Amino acid sequence: MATEILMPALSPTMEEGTLAKWLVKEGDTVSSGDILAEIETDKATMEFEAVDEGILGRILIPAGSEGVKVNTPIGLLLDEGEDAASATVESAQSQQPAPADKTLTSESAPAAAQSHPEPDRSPDWPKGTETHQQTVREALRDAMAEEMRRDGDVFLMGEEVAEYQGAYKISQGLLDEFGSKRVIDTPITEHGFTGIAVGAAFGGLKPIVEYMTFNFAMQAMDQIVNSAAKTLYMSGGQMGAPMVFRGPNGAAARVGAQHSQDFAAWFSHIPGLKVAMPYSASDAKGLLKTAIRDPNPVIFLENEILYGRSFDVPKLDDFTVPFGKARIWREGTDVTIVSFGIGMTYALQAAEKLAEDGISAEVIDLRTLRPMDTATVIASVQKTNRCVTVEEGFPKGAIGNHISAILMQEAFDWLDAPVINCTGKDVPMPYAANLEKHALLTTEEVMEAVRKVTYR
Amino acid sequence: MAARKSATKPNVSAEELTRYYRDMLLIRRFEEKAGQLYGMGLIGGFCHLYIGQEAVVVGLEAAAEDGDKRITSYRDHGHMLACGMDPNGVMAELTGREGGYSKGKGGSMHMFSKEKHFYGGHGIVGAQVPIGAGLAFSDKYRENGRVTFTYFGDGAANQGQVYETFNMAALWKLPVVFVIENNQYAMGTAQQRSTSTPDLHTRGEAFGIPGEVVDGMDVLAVKAAGETAVGHCRAGKGPYILEIKTYRYRGHSMSDPAKYRTREEVQKMREERDPIEHVRSLLLEGKHATEDDLKAIDKEIKSVVNASAEFAKDSPEPALEELWTDIYAEAR
């Protein structure tokens, strides 16, 4: 009885392929393990091995055929003495090739085979909503003021937040409106006041802790990680720390190594923390309001250079942006650029210039890093097949590394090029103007990376 | 400053003394049982016993009112029992079981009870000190008249964040009692080897925080000092420091062979200064109780502790799904 040889699925996601070449011809005797054919998936050329023994009686799909669906009969395997013309065909399930099954048993296969959730593409505010131009600075202040009006348990503490009106003027006017009970100048004592804020949160208040810059939060790392992030878990859900740690993060300009560092990857490493890193003013406002309402500790990473930039902000009484929802700033077809925070500046500039060269880049702003909207990134890469990540932080253990790993595991078959991570250089920030410029990420580097992954 | 002591013949009721006896004995027997379960492999990891220090928490709990808060380090079993947490839940947490206060996810060092206002259970030496001041901050913010007992050891008294906290607690007049349980050894380092000025109750002077030293083997002295401290806080005068001189009979943790002190030193403490024996003799000498009365209490405590051990053994391990719960709180 003849056995059908079926077009194999040579990756968990392959639906069709090209039968590039037959390596046996009609009449040949084949035994299991012999290579029957070469088959091209959308990614690679794979050798297709025989499972059963017999004589190749007939080739049903000739070499060079494209778009052959998985499970299409491509040949007929005859028993000894059987005639190809008269052969009766048996259900060919046993001829199902092994490679796909093998892949499926590997650790990563279930992830690769999983269906990806539909990304949430709803707009941030209803169409037709009136907007106005606001700086990131103003948006942050408005977010705090609105939430402090809404909830008497919300208070702000930090160095120079009250009488000085904020070292970067983020808290301008808050002391006047809310008084010294709720807008509290602290001594210069990050470890101590962070611990006090964590205790206040355990006690049911909702502190906003401002760090003059996140570099100083390093003094308080133990309280953030060991106390704020872990207590909900350690207490079996009895108590946690509903609070926000916020302040400028990343390089400013010419302030040297100890004042120029992006901590996005550090904080994103910690289960129990949420991490937001807005780029625009509307996101700064909407995300900060969400952060203040969140019952968990939220790291809110701002950027000094962005404070003075203006963006459209919707005129809504209560505008919030959910965590875990990326924003597509620019749609494109050739490459996906994923960034967040100040990195968006380089990503958008690069996309603009690349468009002049006919390269269409899709630019995604993650907005929050924990939770991270990987669904939007994966959906975009399924379209563009290429990805470049952009961040200011150091290269080792970067957010981009994580995105690369996610894409490898969940969208490997869509990638036409290795993902490139554009990051700051692997050096402490130098002071000299020329050196600092080179230590930072540049738009040119992003463009170069895009050219590499698009082979252009 | 001489350590505060109680009078030789204190004016205290039989009922009160009996309560202290019972509460301290519960801690003692509970900890002995925990040591035993540890040896049987039923309790793992770190396990820091409170044996010898019982009068500290029992005395201070006697000075606390409903709604007052407490927070401490990893040597926390005594504090939990003294504030009324269920021995079954504490022991089951020690064995890492579902019936534990943290569903088995915290262990010996990390237990909490919202109901009893017990805020942990902290494993990083000194980290509970600013958190305790923060709890007091929340009470001051709410103007509810509550006080927070923030416990830490002589070891933690050398951590920088303690002094950052002293400064802000004094500056903002936070209602917090800083309780320094000075058991004289920071793990294996005797106080004179770690501390330039041994009088820890004076450590708040630079911030204007009053402090006093208390005999921590004398539960009545601890209670009296606690009342002074709490009164100071409730009057809106800010923090207060109690340095309570105590002694732990066991090693720093179960795996500590305690080679840094002599057996004689420990023995002497046990024989001459044991806090439970102190109350026991007050009860007997004052004719507040008979030997038989106390035996009945011993028996009752023993059965409570045995029941907690049985509960802790019988309670199932947490379901594997628990691995993934309580990482984030749901928005309400």
Image: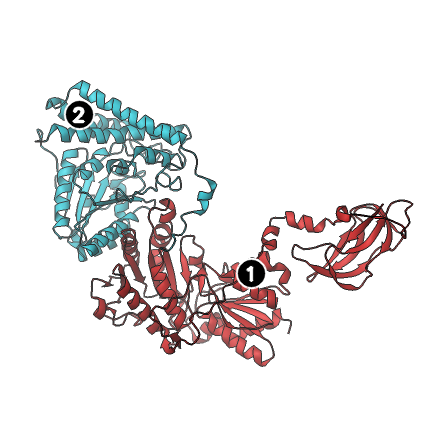
Does residue B38 show up? no
Write down the residue under mark 1.
Answer: A404
Residue A376 at x, y percent in the picture: 52, 64
Q: In front here: A113 or B129?
A: A113
Q: Nearer the viewer, residue A450 or B154?
A: A450
Colour chosen for chain B: cyan
Quarter of the rendering containing residue A268? bottom left
At horizontal 31% and vertical 28% (from top left) the residue drawn is B305
Q: Is residue B156 left or right of residue A33?
A: left
Residue B145 at x, y percent in the picture: 16, 50
Q: Colour of chain A?
A: red
Q: Could you tell me which chain the residue with mark 1 belongs to?
A: A
Callouts 2 and 1 on one subunit: no
| Chain of the residue that carries numbered disc 2 in the rendered image | B
Residue at horizontal 36 percent and vertical 41 percent from the top: B102
Question: Which sits in the foreground, A174 or B153?
Answer: A174
Q: Position of residue A192 (x, y in %)?
A: 28, 55
